[in-house]
Image (cartoon, grey):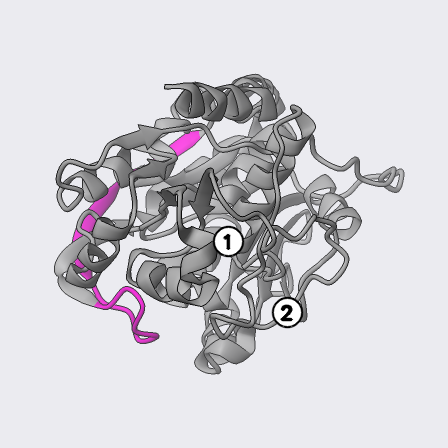
């Protein structure tokens, strides 16, 4: 979904651009409308690849159950002689049974974290699994901040369409309120959400969680451009993600690249890169995965319920100790710049193609 603002769309665009930047011939085929998604991004440039008939490598940034449909839509003439690699994300320890339908149609599977690799391995059979780094472009620079004293600012960013229950923003709001109360204007929580129309109860639950707090700002609306997002991150002192599950965790990576300490649930994909040296991992209890939106409603599987009091303590620490903020932020930026560089991704794909 190259023109979708979804996480899958973002990762596909970033992988495309990384290969292009490092001189690998790369084309794109947009499946946004084909798969029923809204076209959010209209100005992202790519060369359409539907004319590339014959040998080549086809990377499918779609979920497992959609692989047969996508290949059918692309057509036999296009798919013939292609080496097909699925690039998969998932946010629970077990993949749903229907993901098995995609396995026979691919030659290999790329994943970005050990967490996803373990889930995929259980259904992949003899298909090779390639653990590749995710490429992140250098962050857009924020506009110069206004001078003067500003509040210690905590930032939460999430997409309602990616499962409100999984992103768990209400836990982040509770942690902030427990840490600082409702009237301390020397602190601020910004909660930026998109695609609220995908699940209408989201707005009401956010407002109920925020209550009458005067230091919480709920930002809805559409997807922000790169400059506006840079300004949002530039206004923050820390990024908070009390998710129940993440296959990777793009918002956390974005914060780390900008030198912000990240406070996040110590479970799922982000455990590959978020450690006590680069952020503040938060403890959790495993509970049945129940999702009113349906995408992750798998009660036989488990996901994390982060410990809100522990997160509140972490926020208080970061507010009171600028030196800790600086040390964690610098370590986070250094680690993320290496791990998520476009060069690392391009080299891993080059090696895969040459194998």
Asked if residue 101 lies left or right of residue 48, the reply is left
Q: Position of residue 103 (x, y in %)?
A: 23, 50
The Cα–Cα distance between marks 2 and 1, rounded to whole angstroms, is 14 Å
Magenta stretch holds residue 290: yes
Q: Nearer the viewer, mark 2 or mark 1?
A: 2
Q: Does 10 sit left or right of 186 as displayed?
A: left
Give the answer, above or below, for where 209 lies relative to 48. below
Residue drawn 13% across the image and 40% down it: 125
Secondary structure, mark 1, is: helix
Q: Quick one: 246 or 325, which is closer to the camera?
A: 246
Circle nearer the N terminus (2, 1) = 1
At numbered mark 2, what does the secondary structure look like: helix, strand or loop? Answer: loop
Residue 7 disc label = 1
Residue 332 in view, yes or no: no
**Rendered residue at 31%/68% (across/down):** 295
Q: Which residues are magenta?
A: 280-297
98 w.r.t. 347: above or below: below
Q: Give 86 or 294, whichever is nearer the viewer.
A: 86
The image's mark for residue 39 is 2
Find residue 228 and report its horizontal and vertical position in percent. Answer: 77, 52
């Amino acid at each position: 979904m190259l023109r979708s603002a979804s996480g899958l769309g973002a990762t596909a665009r970033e992988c495309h651009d990384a290969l292009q930047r490092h001189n690998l011939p790369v084309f794109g085929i947009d499946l946004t409308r084909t798969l029923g998604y809204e076209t959010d991004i209209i100005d992202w440039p790519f060369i359409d690849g539907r004319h590339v008939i014959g040998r080549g490598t086809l990377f499918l940034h779609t979920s497992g159950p959609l692989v047969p449909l996508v290949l059918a839509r692309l057509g036999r003439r296009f798919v013939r002689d292609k080496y097909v690699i699925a690039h998969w994300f998932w946010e629970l320890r077990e993949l749903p049974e229907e993901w098995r339908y995609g396995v026979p149609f691919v030659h290999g599977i790329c994943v970005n974290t050990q967490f996803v690799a373990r889930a995929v391995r259980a259904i992949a059979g003899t298909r090779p699994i390639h653990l590749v780094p995710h490429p992140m472009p250098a962050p857009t620079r924020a506009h110069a901040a206004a001078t003067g004293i500003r509040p210690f600012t905590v930032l939460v960013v999430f997409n309602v369409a990616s499962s409100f229950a999984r992103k768990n923003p209400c836990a982040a709001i509770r942690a902030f309120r427990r840490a600082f109360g409702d009237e301390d204007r020397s602190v601020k929580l910004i909660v930026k959400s998109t695609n609220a129309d995908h699940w209408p109860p989201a707005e009401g639950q956010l407002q109920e969680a925020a209550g009458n707090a005067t230091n919480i700002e709920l930002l809805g609306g559409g997807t922000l451009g790169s400059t506006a997002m840079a300004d949002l991150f530039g206004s923050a002192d820390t990024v908070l993600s009390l998710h129940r599950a993440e296959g990777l965790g793009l918002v956390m990576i974005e914060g780390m690249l900008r030198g912000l300490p990240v406070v996040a649930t110590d479970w799922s994909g982000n455990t590959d890169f978020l450690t006590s040296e680069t952020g503040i991992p938060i403890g959790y209890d495993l509970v049945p995965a129940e999702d009113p939106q349906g995408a992750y409603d798998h009660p036989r599987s488990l996901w994390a319920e982060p410990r809100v009091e522990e997160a509140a303590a972490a926020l208080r620490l970061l507010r009171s100790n600028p030196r800790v903020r600086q040390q964690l932020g610098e370590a986070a930026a250094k680690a993320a710049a290496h791990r998520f560089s476009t060069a690392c991704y391009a080299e891993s794909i080059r090696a895969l193609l040459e194998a």
